[in-house]
Amino acid sequence: MAYTICLLATIAVLVYFLTYGLMNVSRGQSYFNCDKQLNRKEFSSSFAASTTSLATVLYYFVILGLENGLWIIIFSPASFIIGTLLFSKLMLPRLVKQKYGYIEEGEKTIGNTLGDYIYQRYDSQLVKKVILVITLLGIISVMLIELYVGVQIFNVFMDSNYEIIALIFISIVTFIYTGLGGLNAVVKTDKIQFAFMMLTALILVLFLLFHYTDTLCNLSFDVYFPRFTGKDGIFHSNWALYLNTVCVNILLIPSLLRNWQLFAATKDDEISNGMWIGVFFTVLISLLFVLFGIYFYTIFAVPKDPSLNHILSTMANSGNAILSNFLFPMLFVACLMALLSTVDSSLLPIVQSLVMDTRLIKYKDEKYTNIKCIAVILFVTLFLYLIVFKLLNFDILNWLFTIFSLVTISSPAIIFACFGNKEVLKNKKMQNTVVWSTILGLIIAGGISLWGNKLGMLWLIQLNTPFAVAISSFIIFVVYIYTKNSIKNK
């Protein structure tokens, strides 16, 4: 009965979002930026929902929370708060001053995309193309990991040999309602999705606390905050994980295409407050799911390879009517909504870049633009899925940390674009340095990931972002100072 309820709830959710897209078709400039009319509530819910991904909060935090306890909350959401603080206090005022997100009269849009912004600051099509290719590669990789984890949870219902069917079905539903409804559809559905995820997390934690009080009330402090020194007296810590987490979260906001799209669509005086509301709810839901993971595996035996599938199967077969028939379907639907919220938030900026930055698809064919984009992205995503997870056999956590490097490797170039002197940025030597240092960073990050995946060393993969970003930033900084002094001394 539990599986039947869960399956019916899943079908109902997918049909609802598909119907919403078909009945709320968006066109024109509002398709990409809602005519710059998003308010702080809409911004915050979309920001939080897209940040609360299935791969991170509902996998990364729940599973890694078992080993790291609440330390993962201190090092991950706390570093994300630092990244948000730096962006909102330092970068955002400069973006507003530089008129990012405003539209001039006529058809030409100014600063409506990251690509536009990079071109304005560096005055180089090559820099723009390199940054766009890397950011697009990163955001497509985000979709890959979401779809991978999403397909895995469907194994609760079906044999793993049929997972490609679930992959195609989920992709088509998400791509249709996003492709037809545009940013307005993404923002409206994000609000529903995040509210349901938050409610689910809260109910799960409260249920376990009240129903298994005797078991959970005796938990030791070490369960919540594991000691770094083991019984052998040797210092043990996931230092590579924490270094990667801090590095990624501080650089994440300026490197995500979906954030730039939200910034361009939101009123300037609403962005900062909306971002902090979104961060608060992101941290809260992360905390709830870490606690859920700790409590769940305190009550039920920890398997050799803990996963969302194991959690869902254990809940469905627990013998507890509430846990099986109510909370199991609820958690499954929350996982599905986390998947949808991240995929749709990743998909739309890709469509925007294909149309407005790369001009691969001309927007004058408005009637067919979205259909073409959806078909292209669907094909590319499914192709990369087969390459990464079937041919290269990337482990999910290995690929997760590889994605972080792909997403953030362009951050140094973006940050310099924001704070750098425009005359220096437009210097040919500076332009070439940004291009080749960013490519070098990508090669370093990719090489470390492939090497670590081959050796089965997760800690080595976790060092890809810190090493790649540090080297790329250092090169850009040295050449920037040299170029600035050379111009000054002329």
Image (spheres, rainbow, N blue to C red):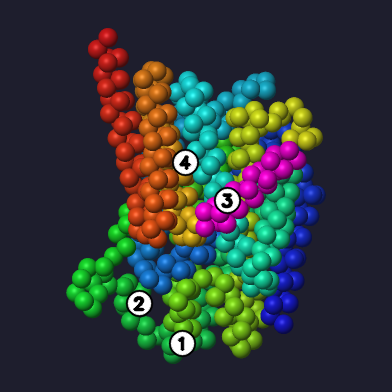
Q: Earlier in the sequence, mark 2 or mark 4?
A: 2
Q: x and y percent of residue 233 in the render?
A: 19, 74
On the image, which quarter does residue 27 sit in? top right
Task: Provide the residue designation for mark 2.
Answer: 223
Q: Comparing marks 2 and 3, which lies closer to the viewer?
A: 3
Q: Position of residue 143 (x, y in %)?
A: 58, 51
What's the residue at 63%, 34% (across, down)? 354
Look at the picture and state if 118 lies above or below 209.
above
Mark 2 vs 3, N-terminal side: 2
Q: Earlier in the sequence, mark 1 or mark 4?
A: 1
Image location (x, y in percent) of residue 353? 60, 35
Q: State the CA–CA distance, disc 2 to disc 1.
A: 16 Å
Label 4: which residue?
255
Kind of residue sitting beneath label 4: Ser
Left or right, 434 with reference to 38: left
Give the answer, above or below, for where 445 lies relative to 433.
Answer: below
Q: Nearer the viewer, residue 28 or 340?
A: 340
Q: Is residue 91 left or right of residue 348?
A: left
Rate crowding at label 1 as few (under 14), some (14 to 19) or many (20 or more) other CA atoms within 10 Å: few
Task: Compute the Cα span from label 4 to label 3.
Answer: 25 Å
Q: Amino acid at mark 1?
A: Thr
User: Magenta part mainly helix, strand or loop?
Assistant: helix
Going from the N terminus, do you reach mark 3 or mark 1 first?
Answer: 1
Determine which residue is flagged by label 3. Answer: 387
